[in-house]
């Protein structure tokens, strides 16, 4: 690559970082201000600083929207980075966290909790969802492993798709057999930030933090992996360890996010494409830009979810599908396909 092109790419990256920070700050303020009880931005700032505001505004901002916004940021980052990792590991530009059976495993275990243990609220079945994600991912990794003990990308993808189909079929059968019991899962299965306070997210956030830290440390190794297993080994990278660590990070990130809010589509699929388009193939920049852009998309979808059916609201998972699908189609049409 010529020097002018390198300089242009570097300038684009830093410009994107600046624009992303501005967008994130704007959507954070919007998330705190917009809802069934609109709060002016200046009152939001006063409430956050502890100044004298009405009890209703203080409760809306500090007690309800601050936890929701923080959790939305964490979930957006987790889903976006998980998508970037799984696309790099499987070398599949259409991969998202669900390809490892994360969503299906969570749904299956939550269904077991509802049917077998009578669970009915998010703070009760969040641990079932996280355990399901872990068990499903381990099962996919074992089935998708090659004879030498390493993780094969093609087998990993096929194993994930197969397990997802099987578990989804079982959950559908359970739902048909006892539809009244499964009414408790409707909001979770569509992906929602409603009633997701600290009591639901608090126990899971440390797992997600470990997953994010692992992902940030894997950038250089994933760059070597993109050159091929033989080249990566020559460069001193342990291929199987890189893939195993990436799968673990995806499990913690996507499993934790799914446990908190339920399945949310397109974040992990689309945002890494945008980051790759802006920052190029360097996985360190892809992961870094994804950390910034993914919460912007999820919080924007959450704000839209509050106003579309005002004074009620729509599940954020539905909005991300409506927002993400046309944007992803536009990106694919513009670039055809993105090299991994």
Image (cartoon, grey):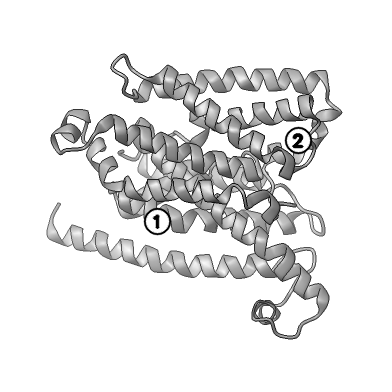
Q: Residue at the spot x=29%, y=29% of the render? A: 240
Q: Residue at the spot x=31%, y=14% of the render? A: 147
Q: Is residue 240 left or right of residue 1?
A: right
Q: Residues within 10 Å of mark 2 (few under 14, many from 20)?
A: many
Q: Is residue 53 left or right of residue 32?
A: right
Q: Residue at the spot x=64%, y=45% of the render? A: 260
Q: Is residue 165 above or below residue 48?
A: above
User: Can residue 205 be seen in this snapshot?
Assistant: yes
On the image, numbered disc 2 is attached to which residue?
A: 185
Q: Residues within 10 Å of mark 1 (few under 14, many from 20)?
A: many
On the image, numbered disc 1 is attached to which residue?
A: 289
User: Can residue 103 be seen in this snapshot?
Assistant: no
Q: Residue at the spot x=54%, y=20% of the render? A: 163
Q: Is residue 311 above or below residue 170?
A: below
Residue 318 - label: none
Q: Is residue 40 above or below residue 106?
A: below
Most foreground residue, 28 or 254: 254
Most foreground residue, 97 or 38: 97
Q: Earlier in the sequence, mark 2 or mark 1?
A: 2
Q: How far from the left and from the top, in percent, is residue 128?
A: 66, 34
What distance separates the C-alpha of mark 2 from that of mark 1? Answer: 33 Å
Q: How far from the left and from the top, in percent, is residue 56?
A: 82, 73
Q: Secondary structure at mark 2?
A: helix
Most foreground residue, 142 or 293: 142
Q: In which image quadrant can residue 248 be found?
A: top left
Q: How far from the left and from the top, in percent, is residue 38?
A: 76, 70
Q: Quadrant of the C terminus?
A: top left
Q: Secondary structure at mark 1?
A: helix
Residue placed furthest toward the right:
180
């Amino acid at each position: 690559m010529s020097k002018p092109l390198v300089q242009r790419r570097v300038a684009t990256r830093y410009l994107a970082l600046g624009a992303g920070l501005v967008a994130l700050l704007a959507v954070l303020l919007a998330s705190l201000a917009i809802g069934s009880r609109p709060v002016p931005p200046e009152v939001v700032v006063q409430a956050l600083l502890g100044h004298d505001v009405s009890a209703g505004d203080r409760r809306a901002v500090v007690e309800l929207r601050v936890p929701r916004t923080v959790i939305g940021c964490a979930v957006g980052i987790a889903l976006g980075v998980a998508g970037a990792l799984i696309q790099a590991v499987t070398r599949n530009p259409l991969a998202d966290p669900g390809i490892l059976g994360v969503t299906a495993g969570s749904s299956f275990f939550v269904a077991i909790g509802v049917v077998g243990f009578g669970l009915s609220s998010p703070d009760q079945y969040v641990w079932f969802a996280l355990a399901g994600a872990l068990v499903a991912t381990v099962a996919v990794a074992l089935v998708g492993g090659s004879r030498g003990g390493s993780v094969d990308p093609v087998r990993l993808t096929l194993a994930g798709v197969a397990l997802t189909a099987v578990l989804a079929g079982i959950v559908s059968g359970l739902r048909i057999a006892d539809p009244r019991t499964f009414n408790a899962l409707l909001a979770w299965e569509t992906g929602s930030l409603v009633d997701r306070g600290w009591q639901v997210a608090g126990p899971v956030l440390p797992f997600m933090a470990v997953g994010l830290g692992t992902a940030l440390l894997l950038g250089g190794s994933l760059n070597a992996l993109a050159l091929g297993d033989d080249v990566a080994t020559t460069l001193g990278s342990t291929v199987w360890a890189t893939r195993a660590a990436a799968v673990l990070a995806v499990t913690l990130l996507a499993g934790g996010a799914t446990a908190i809010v339920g399945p949310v589509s397109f974040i992990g699929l689309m945002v890494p494409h945008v980051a790759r388009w802006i920052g190029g193939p360097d996985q360190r920049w892809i992961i870094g830009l994804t950390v910034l852009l993914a919460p912007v998309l999820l919080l924007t979808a959450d704000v839209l979810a509050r106003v579309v059916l005002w004074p009620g609201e729509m599940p954020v998972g539905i909005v991300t599908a409506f927002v993400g699908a046309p944007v992803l189609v536009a990106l694919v049409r513009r670039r055809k396909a993105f090299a991994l």
